[in-house]
Image (cartoon, rainbow, N blue to C red):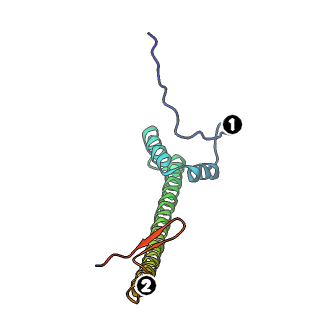
Amino acid sequence: MSSTRIEPQPVASIPLEATGELTLPELEAHFRALSLRELSFEAAQLAAIVDIPTQGEPYQFYAQLQQYLADATEAKVDGYVLFKEYLEAESETWTVKKQALVQMCDRLIAHKQSQLKALKQTLIALHEQGLIADYLVGKHKAIQILPN
């Protein structure tokens, strides 16, 4: 029996320079390219692996990373909200179009029913005037006028 081992994979791979380090602008660009889910993992991983210094250059670097993560997260949230608003507007637009189409179809149906009623009334009037018989035969169809 063979066992399969699943190794955890990093959420996103960061391209490193030859020195193995990233510049702050590269980190910022990397964070902006991540999804909201990936940003959440990055923030959690950063918090888990970094001993938070209280001052000096390491603190400033950590604070800058946190700011980049916050900025990227805010941009993603804004994007989600804008997309949500777009979808809501599209949904409302199509609802209005659907209502207009339903009204148009109702008018067409009413018009066709009116035409059918007029056709029947014409045949009845012609029959009552004695101009047509009770039973009319065409090549493929027949009309029978029944007393009501």
Of the image marks 1 and 2, the number of the one nearer the N terminus = 1
Name the residue furthest bottom.
129
Mark 1 crowd level (few <14, some 14–19, many ≥20, 10 Å Cα): few
| Residue type, numbered disc 2 | Ala
Above or below 21: residue 93:
below
**Position of 33 compared to 103: left or right?**
right
Residue 127: mark: none
Closer to us: mark 1 or mark 2? 2
Please give the label number shown on residue 19.
1
Local SS, label 2: helix
Residue in view at x 62 percent, y 52 percent: 29
> Where 44 sits versus 98, above or below?
above
x%, y% of residue 44?
43, 43
Foreground of the two, 97 or 47: 97
Q: Residue at x 45, y 86 (%)?
A: 131
Distance from label 1 to label 2 (Cα)? 89 Å
Secondary structure under the numbered disc 1 in the rendered image: loop
